[in-house]
Image (cartoon, helix red, strand yellow):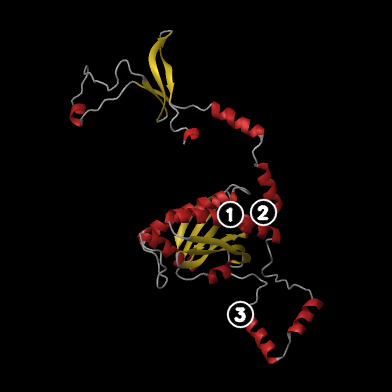
């Protein structure tokens, strides 16, 4: 999951060995870096994402991490901590090789964008979530294992909610509708793009109770290509500014709300009958209501009593006269 500029473990070992044996010194390395400021470019894995686009994706998924953190904290009622650890670009083959087996791999679409993306969650995190939902303390398992059918059904609901949080996080840049297509446990069964295609990998560090692990979001370049121009901090700022409420927008919304139709019901009265009495009802039977003739009637707005009124007739049409306004339950009185 490391980027092209990160040393491999063998290169780090060779460098440490050279320093310890005195073949090279730290001063020589610094002098060489000053003399040669050349970045090696690998044509087999060209950079598809600029630094600005990587920064924008980082900001997007910081927002996603906050939303997911809020949801899981309320849903699991335990200590949750989710942060963006890194955003890298690499080949799809490198991403597949980095995933553990078994794992929990959700393949999802980002409509209207074409193609699929992946949300991979470490089994420790998934099993801790399931343990917490089943009433346990949320402890990580002794060793990773595959999910049972019941556990898979439970985690699908959690992932679907995570998709909603991702939709909310992305809406400031582009409106997407993430939808889960499949849930896999073997990385070899998740070939969504050719192995050498470039992808962007967003790694989230998750801690749920005593369980720790990584959550990886892998989005191929081909999926994001149509919106690459929007993945910039400039577009991010301009979109946020454009969405600020203006007086004209508020007035338009107010006019639309004033024209909204709502149910307006006058309740003449209520009666309580047994099931036996209900079955015996027939044409001509009379039900005695609990409301007396001199009592005011209840005027319902939706399912809430809002006014008291008296019945009457105006111009040969049934009508009511408002006698009392019931303010209980209004925002001003809560």
- The answer to whether residue 190 is seen in the rendering is no
At x 71% / y 51%, what residue is drawn?
234
Q: Which residue is mark 1?
A: 63
Which of discs 1 and 3 lies nearer the camera? The answer is: 1
Question: Is residue 140 shown above or below 179?
Answer: below
Observer-nearest residue: 18 or 26? Answer: 26
Q: Is residue 255 left or right of residue 308?
A: right
Image quadrant holding the N terminus, namely bottom right
Distance from Cα at disc 1 to Cα at disc 3: 33 Å
For marks 1 and 2 on the same chain, the one whose residue lies earlier in the sequence: 1
Left or right: where 304 falls relative to 331: left
Q: Which mark is residue 231?
A: 2
Image label count: 3
The residue drawn where x is 61% and y is 71% is 2
**CA–CA distance between discs 3 and 2?**
33 Å
Q: Which mark is residue 53?
A: none
**Which one is nearer the viewer's eye here, 116 or 155?**
155
Q: Which residue is mark 3?
A: 9
Instruction: Give me the residue at 54% from left, 53% from top.
Output: 166
How far across and down, in percent of the image, does residue 160 sit?
A: 47, 53
Q: Residue 232 appears at what percent x and percent y?
A: 69, 54
Residue 228, quarter of the rendered image: bottom right
Q: Residue furthest right?
A: 35
- Is 101 rendered above or below residue 173? below
Q: Residue furthest bottom?
A: 21
SS at circle 3: helix
First in sequence: mark 3 or mark 2? Answer: 3
The mark closer to the camera, 1 or 2, is 1
Residue 127: x percent and y percent?
A: 41, 64
Secondary structure category for the residue under label 2: loop
């Amino acid at each position: 999951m490391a980027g092209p500029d990160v040393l491999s473990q063998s290169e780090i070992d060779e460098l440490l060995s050279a320093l310890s044996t005195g073949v090279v010194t730290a001063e020589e390395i610094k002098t060489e870096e000053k003399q040669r400021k050349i970045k090696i470019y690998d044509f087999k894995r060209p950079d598809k994402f600029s630094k600005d686009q990587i920064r924008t994706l980082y900001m997007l998924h910081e927002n996603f991490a906050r939303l997911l953190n809020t949801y899981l904290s309320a849903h699991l009622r335990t200590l949750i901590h989710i942060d963006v650890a890194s955003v890298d670009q690499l080949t799809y083959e490198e991403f597949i090789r980095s995933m553990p087996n078994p794992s929990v791999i959700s393949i999802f679409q980002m409509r209207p964008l074409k193609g699929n993306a992946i949300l991979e969650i470490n089994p420790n995190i998934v099993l801790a979530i399931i343990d917490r939902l089943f009433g346990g303390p949320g402890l990580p398992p002794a060793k990773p294992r595959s999910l049972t059918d019941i556990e898979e059904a439970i985690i699908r609901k959690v992932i679907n909610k995570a998709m909603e949080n991702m939709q909310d996080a992305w809406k400031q840049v582009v409106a997407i509708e993430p939808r889960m297509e499949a849930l896999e446990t073997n990385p070899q069964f998740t070939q969504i793009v050719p192995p050498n295609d470039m992808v962007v990998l967003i790694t989230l560090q998750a801690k749920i109770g005593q369980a720790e692990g990584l959550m990886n979001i892998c989005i191929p370049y081909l999926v994001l290509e149509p919106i690459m121009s929007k993945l910039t901090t400039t577009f991010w700022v301009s979109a946020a500014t454009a969405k600020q409420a203006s007086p004209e927008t508020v007035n338009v919304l107010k006019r639309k709300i004033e024209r909204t139709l709502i149910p307006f019901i006058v309740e003449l009265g209520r009666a309580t009958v047994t099931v036996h009495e209900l079955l015996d009802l027939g044409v001509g039977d009379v039900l005695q209501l609990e409301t007396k003739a001199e009592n005011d009637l209840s005027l319902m707005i939706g399912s809430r009593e809002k006014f008291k009124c008296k019945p009457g007739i105006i111009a040969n049409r049934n009508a009511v006269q408002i006698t009392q306004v019931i303010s209980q339950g209004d925002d001003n009185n809560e």
